[in-house]
Amino acid sequence: MLRFVVRRLVGMAIVLFVVSILVFLIFNVIPNSPPAQRLAGKNATPTLVKSIEEEWGFDESLPVQYVTMMKNVFTGELTSYSPRIPVDEQIEEGIPATFSLSIGAGIIWLTFGLILGYLAATRAGGWLDRALTGVAIAGISIPVFLLAPVLIYFLTYKLEIFPNGGYVPLTEDPWEWLTHLILPWFTLAVLSIGFYSRVLRSNMLDVMNEDYVRTARAKGLSERRVMTRHVLRNSLIPVVTLFGLDFGATIAGTAIITEVLFNIDGVGLYAAESIKRVELPPIMGVTLYGAFFVVFVNTLVDVAYAYLDPRVRLGASAR
Amino acid sequence: MSAPPLLSVRDLRVGFATEGGLLQAVDGVSFDLEAGEVLAIVGESGSGKSVTAQTIIGLTRSKNSRIEGSVKLDGEELVEADDAAMRRLRGERIAMIFQDPMTSFNPVYRIGNQIVEAIRAHIGEKVEKAEARRRVVELFESVGIPDAERRVDDYPHEFSGGMRQRAMIAMALALEPEVLIADEPTTALDVTIQAQILRLLEDLNREHGLATILITHDLGIVAEVADRVLVMYAGRIVEQGTLDEIFYDPQHPYTWGLMGSLTRLDRPRPHRLPQIPGQPPSLVDLPGGCPFRPRCPHEFSKCTEYPGLEARLAEAPDHRDRCWLTPEQKREKRQVEGQIGLEAPG
């Protein structure tokens, strides 16, 4: 177990290092006005620009700038150019909203994806399976930026069922928190519901041909038990891997579009605005935060994987 | 003689709807199985032997399959029994073990729990876990799994192939069935392990009077354990008889071919291993006449007519075959280089 944790930590450090280098390089190659110029304002004197350059270290070589920036990342001193706000504070402020959105959407897509996939697989070839195939393909095909305005137009403006965007913290008012999030949750989940139901369906159809499913039938189990305990259980293993990747990616970035569309004040919205303003420190901060969660969630998935599949359990063969 | 047989199969026909048309996997198979008897069904892949076995316990039922004929267990009709009745009967009265013990256990559950699951499915969830577990330990000991107390908590991947097949047999015996169907139980095992598993099956058959259907393509195994033999080809029985009748006086050229393909240690090694030429026919569109005709070197004009399964030997009324050759012709033609064979190895 210790070896597993150490290996993961080393892996995470490598991933974060590579990601930070890439972000830093990309930022420095894209066409952009010098940041000192922008910080100084439109009618700044050359001396002011010069002093800002020195203060922020823009006159240093790129490797030095990189090292300074990474030092700031780890000491929590990373600040955005204008307004000069610590990046870690901004991310911390955004995390409750982003996590509310991502975790809720994750639960919804996993629940609905699994239910619909199970129904389709156990009735493969039937009318319900065909109907669910159509629904799933529609869900996968509708882009989020189309779905969100349509939902907002009909359910918020026309029928006035849901509030118009924004985020209310759970600690402030749980009911408002819920009603504000329902539309974003589903917007974010629809694609994955469709996708997961398809993946589970095809996994289950594969597993149904396994010898051990025949054994389960041969020993006289009920069809329902064969389907849940043997077919579904074994079909979940690849789904869990997929969920780890997708959930990490949602926290790290997929949520951005949904946050922007529903004006949810989370990390994604902060990232979108920073990108618009071409500010390196927040982009770096948000990217590292995202990369951290992708690696972290995948580590959790590997632990869950060992629980689901005894063959990969560590040290199992040593017994 | 008067009591009905334990298991009676009459004119069983199993077809599957495929894209190419109806595939008649089993075409009019009939046989009886008495308590304590070992019946071997032999044939190549695709001869219908596994489908026959799986149909007996209702595993071939599906939207795409068509099952006709009759399977009676103790006089009770199974082909028309509803799914719930078949479910109760599976495992409890007729148990089945499969070819590949490597893939026949669910990899994610402990072996002991998979057997407990079978016990509880029939006796009910009220069987206490500890009691069911004790039963599994007993079963493990009875099939010769060492250190049973500890091994019940192992996962399938922690068992060797031979041990898994023993565990499979333990599972099949859990509810003391009357009929055991063993579908190629030793094919995936090493030769030394094969012998152990066969010995185990033989002991169980003797001690418990367990009626056994042994499905195999290996005549060596048949010779070890079978009382009676059915030879199947293209979904039909082409020859049936007692072990001695089939081995010492085989009547059908296909049986000769199977025997000729056995390599014998007491003879000089042949230049090439003998084989039956050609491929088994497609079951979707079977040509008329004897289905073995295209592969048979002894084919003659009469073979365009489909022969019935008849006793052709006056001295052995239960030895039946589907070949038009006279017994005298057969005795002469099956001699290949001093032993039984289909034709001289080329």
Image (tube, rainbow, N blue to C red):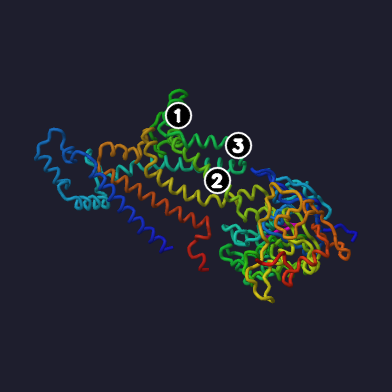
Residue type at tag 2: Ser
**How many numbered circles does the render carry?**
3
Residue type at tag 1: Leu
Residue B273 vs residue B225, the one in the foreground? B273
Residue type at tag 3: Leu
Residue A257 place in picture, x, y as percent:
37, 36
**Residue shown at the point (61%, 42%) measured from the top left:** A124
Do the residues indicated by labels 3 and 1 lie within the same chain of the protein?
yes
Q: Does the magenta segment cover residue B95?
A: yes
Residue B73 place in picture, x, y as percent:
80, 54
Asked whether, in this view, residue A144 is left or right of residue B119, the answer is left
Q: Quadrant of residue A165?
A: top left
- Determine contact: label 3, label 2, CB under 8 Å: no
Q: Which residue is mark 3?
A: A128
Which chain does tag 2 point to?
A
Residue B307 vs residue A251, the one in the foreground? B307
Q: Residues within 10 Å of mark 1 (few under 14, many from 20)?
A: some
Image quadrant occupied by the N terminus of chain B: bottom right
Nearer the N terminus, badge 3 or badge 2?
A: 3
Residue A118 vs residue A43, the one in the foreground? A118
Q: Of helix, strand and loop, which one carries label 1?
A: helix
The mark closer to the camera, 3 or 1, is 3
Q: Which residue is mark 2?
A: A202
Q: Which residue is mark 1?
A: A151
Q: Residues within 10 Å of mark 3 (few under 14, many from 20)?
A: some
**Disc 3 and disc 1: Cα gap in Å?**
26 Å
Q: Which residues are magenta?
A: B91-97
